[in-house]
Image: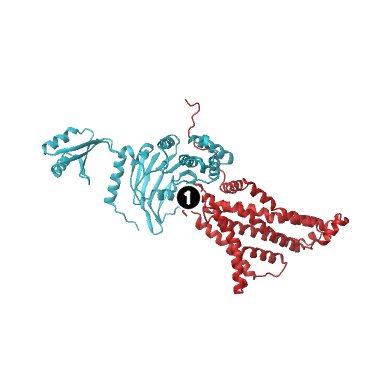
Chain colours: A cyan, B red
């Protein structure tokens, strides 16, 4: 694991934003998921040492965020969510400046600036002032500046913000590429589940200041399960009882639908057979695999049930 | 088919020591300042006082030139300036000359980085808030030092070289010349530090550098006018806290050229106030986590 959180608590004024967060985050590329205001950005800023925790500890590659913030910043590359650049500097000069601040000597910083800008597809535009670039290209410059000093951990806060579909695909390819070949860990914070699914091997779900789920996406997805969404007319309680007695997991959702999860060797025809026996009319049946969206929604629902928010 | 594919490569080279990295802040800031011809030319104008005073010293002390009637006539009409008075006059003029490049250079220094939320990029490097402030302060300090104490040292050397008498400067080095040199460095250092801090404070006020320039002007001119008005109306000398008055009175006090017009504790308090307030403001304002909104 490269990040360890032990009862990490962070306040903004009197408001508790991270509430005794416990987690051990591992994996080459990790997606940080959570609804707005869940504490994703606060966690990132705490890991960078921008915000001091009021309780607990956090360690990044073994370094404590309270006492070793500078060491941590040396090994982290951070791509902020909002537009961030210094007006009047060309892309290459901005990267060279930031590279030198991170400890590269002048020549190495210049070399890396060119190299990284080419890598993110900004080779032709590298001498243009950053403020004259399109939002998409500014986004690429932000990624390049996070890479310029060769970090061991790359933290990307909403990297596909403001990108058109083509730009978004290219950005996602880059992020996936970095996660796979660079040897760096990638933490990608995003609202877009598809982006996380595309780029990341693992996921950490945050809700109301706590990490409610961590693990590898492939494992969490329960690929060995067959999931059916049904709509029925008839005695639904009896039907649910009968499904449960078959050993399958079933839940009724708020919209009157039913979700059945059965093992990989389960047979769709069993559902029809059961419906006929119980005299229940099937109005809708949809087969799907367990997606990241389901994992996310389930994790949030589970956290709401088990740990209602205890913010100050 | 691409003939050359660029792949990501991690950096595995050596890292420079921490304090050396701070030098990149003044380096890039000075590069941006001197990118504009107006800043360079104003900077050039800043040496005029030193050249005039050097010429004065040369003309009034050269035995060779004194043999020329035209020069001796000109010298006779020049007011006599004692060494300490010369430095006091030098600093009084240089203070105003410093304000022009300060107004050109300082406002953009931090506001440019606040404008598009550039601070998180800087602070996500191993750079502390203190390091950032020192780096920016060094930019202005280099700038103002060149216009103040560096020129004053040159003037001091010129004075030693041309001063008449039997090597009076060297004979009285410890009793007179050395204290004067220390005074030159102290007054120059105070002007450099305080003006740099005020310039930085003004620059951190807003994302808009024009507004920052206005704030700087208000701080320097406004404080002078306001404190003067207050002191005159209330007939209280302790109320002089304008920057110009404080520097002028500090120079008078250090060089001992006259009685100070305002009490010495007021000068000390004023200088401390103009040093601590900007530092406190900069620490409060420069946070890496904020997206500045105005």
Chain ID, mark 1: A
Q: Residue at x 61, y 58 (%)?
A: B195
Task: Indicate the position of residue A23 as horizontal and vertical percent values.
Answer: 36, 47
Towards the viewer: A262 or B90: B90
Can residue B131 be seen in the rendering of this structure?
no
Q: On screen, B165 above or below A48?
A: below
Q: On screen, B89 above or below A263?
A: below
Q: Is residue A20 left or right of residue B68?
A: left
Q: Residue at x 49, y 31 (%)?
A: B6
Task: Indicate the position of residue A283 as horizontal and vertical percent values.
Answer: 18, 38
Q: Residue at x 49, y 48 (%)?
A: B116
Q: Is residue B165 left or right of residue B294?
A: right
Task: Indicate the position of residue B169 as horizontal and vertical percent values.
Answer: 79, 60
Can residue A105 be seen in the rendering of this structure?
yes
Task: Indicate the position of residue A176 as horizontal and vertical percent values.
Answer: 41, 36
Towards the viewer: A221 or A34: A34
Q: Is residue A264 left or right of residue B26?
A: left
**Helix, strand or loop at mark 1:** helix
> Total of numbered circles in the picture?
1
Q: Which residue is mark 1?
A: A69
- How packed is label 1: few (under 14 Cα within 10 Å), some, or many (20 or more)? many
Q: Residue at x 39, y 59 (%)?
A: A14
Q: Is residue B156 left or right of residue A283?
A: right
């Amino acid at each position: 694991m490269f990040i360890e959180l032990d009862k990490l608590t962070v306040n903004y004024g009197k408001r508790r934003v991270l509430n005794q967060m416990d987690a051990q985050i591992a994996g080459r590329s990790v997606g940080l998921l959570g609804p707005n205001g869940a504490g994703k950005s606060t966690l990132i800023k705490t890991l960078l040492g921008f915000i001091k925790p009021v309780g607990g500890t956090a360690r990044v590659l073994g370094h404590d965020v309270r006492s070793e913030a500078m060491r941590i910043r040396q090994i982290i590359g951070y791509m902020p969510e909002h537009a961030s650049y210094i007006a009047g500097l060309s892309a290459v000069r901005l990267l060279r400046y930031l590279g030198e601040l991170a400890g590269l000597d002048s020549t190495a910083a210049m070399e890396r600036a060119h190299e990284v800008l080419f890598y993110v597809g900004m080779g032709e535009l590298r001498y243009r002032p950053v403020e004259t670039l399109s939002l998409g290209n500014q986004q690429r410059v932000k990624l390049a500046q996070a890479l310029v000093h060769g970090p061991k951990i790359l933290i990307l806060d909403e990297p596909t913000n403001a990108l058109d579909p083509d730009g978004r695909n290219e950005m996602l390819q880059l992020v996936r590429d970095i996660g796979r070949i660079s040897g760096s860990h990638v933490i990608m914070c995003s609202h877009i589940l598809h982006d996380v699914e595309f780029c990341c091997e693992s996921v950490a779900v945050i809700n109301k200041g706590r990490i409610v789920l961590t693990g590898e996406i492939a494992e969490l997805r329960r690929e060995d399960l067959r999931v059916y969404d049904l709509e029925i007319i008839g005695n639904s309680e009896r039907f649910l009882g009968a499904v449960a007695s078959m050993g399958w997991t079933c839940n009724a959702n708020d919209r009157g639908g039913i979700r059945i999860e059965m093992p990989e060797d389960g047979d769709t025809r069993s559902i029809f057979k059961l419906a006929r026996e119980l005299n229940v009319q099937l109005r809708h049946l949809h087969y799907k695999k367990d997606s990241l969206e389901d994992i996310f929604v389930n994790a949030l629902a589970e956290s709401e049930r088990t740990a209602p928010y205890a913010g100050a | 088919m691409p003939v050359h594919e660029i792949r990501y490569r991690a950096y595995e080279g050596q890292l420079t020591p921490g304090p050396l990295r701070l030098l990149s802040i003044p380096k890039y800031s000075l590069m941006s300042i001197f990118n504009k011809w107006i800043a360079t030319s104003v900077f050039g104008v800043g040496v005029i006082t030193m050249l005039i005073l050097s010429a004065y010293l040369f003309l009034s002390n050269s035995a060779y030139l004194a043999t020329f009637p035209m020069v001796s006539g000109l010298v006779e009409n020049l007011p006599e300036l004692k060494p300490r008075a010369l430095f006091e006059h030098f600093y009084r003029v240089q203070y105003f000359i410093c304000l022009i490049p300060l107004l050109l250079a300082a406002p953009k220094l931090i506001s440019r980085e606040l404008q598009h939320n550039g601070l998180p990029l800087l602070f996500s490097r191993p750079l502390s808030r203190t390091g950032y402030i020192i780096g920016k302060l060094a930019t202005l300090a280099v700038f103002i030092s060149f216009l103040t104490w560096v020129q004053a040292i040159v003037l001091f050397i010129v004075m030693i070289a041309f001063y008449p008498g039997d090597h009076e400067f060297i004979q009285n080095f410890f009793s007179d010349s050395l204290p004067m040199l220390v005074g030159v460095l102290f007054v120059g250092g105070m002007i450099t530090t305080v003006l740099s801090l005020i310039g930085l404070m003004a620059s951190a006020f807003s994302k808009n550098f024009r507004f920052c320039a206005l704030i700087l002007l208000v701080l320097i001119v406004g404080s002078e006018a306001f404190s003067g008005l207050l002191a005159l109306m209330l007939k209280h000398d302790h109320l002089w806290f304008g920057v110009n008055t404080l520097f002028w009175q500090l120079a008078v006090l250090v060089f001992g050229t006259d009685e100070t017009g305002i009490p010495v504790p007021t000068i000390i308090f004023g200088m401390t106030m103009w040093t601590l307030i900007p530092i406190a403001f900069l620490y409060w304002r420069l946070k890496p986590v904020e997206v500045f909104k105005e």
